[in-house]
Image: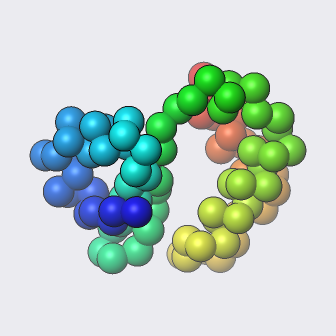
Amino acid sequence: MESIGIYEAKSRLSELVEKVEAGEPVTLTRRGKAVARIVAVSGKDEGIDRSTLMKEIRAFSKTVRLRGGRLSDRALRRLRDEGRD
């Protein structure tokens, strides 16, 4: 999996999307720390159940250090719902 800084990713977005479409996830970093992951969308992802999605989000949140500590389940749900708008 490739890791790339956000600043550089902005100028190489088309190239990164092509890599993701080819099946290679890309991790975006800020000051060397992972902050986001770009992955391909597949037909099976659309039918993913919420509990599985929340487990994946919780697992990812444990890999990221936050200034204020760990995200609560309530905060994770709020972020999930916000992303649906």
The quadrant in which the N terminus is found is: bottom left
Q: Residue furthest left?
A: 11
Q: Quadrant of residue 5?
A: bottom left
Whether residue 13 is visible to the viewer of this picture, yes or no, is no
In the rendered image of this protein, does residue 27 appear above or below residue 24?
below
Task: Estimate the x, y position of residue 53 in percent, counting from the top left.
Answer: 75, 44
Q: Quadrant of residue 78?
A: top right
21 displayed left or right of 65: left
- Residue ID at (27%, 57%): 6
The quadrant in which the C terminus is found is: top right
User: Of residues 30 and 22, which is closer to you in this image?
Assistant: 22
Task: Estimate the x, y position of residue 17 in percent, counting from the top left.
Answer: 31, 38
56 displayed left or right of 34: right
- Residue ID at (82%, 38%): 50
Task: Estimate the x, y position of residue 47 in percent, counting from the top left.
Answer: 75, 26
9 displayed left or right of 2: left
- Residue ID at (65%, 44%): 79
User: Of residues 37 and 42, which is closer to you in this image?
Assistant: 42
Whether residue 39 is visible to the viewer of this picture, yes or no, is yes
- Residue ID at (43%, 52%): 25
Badge count: 0
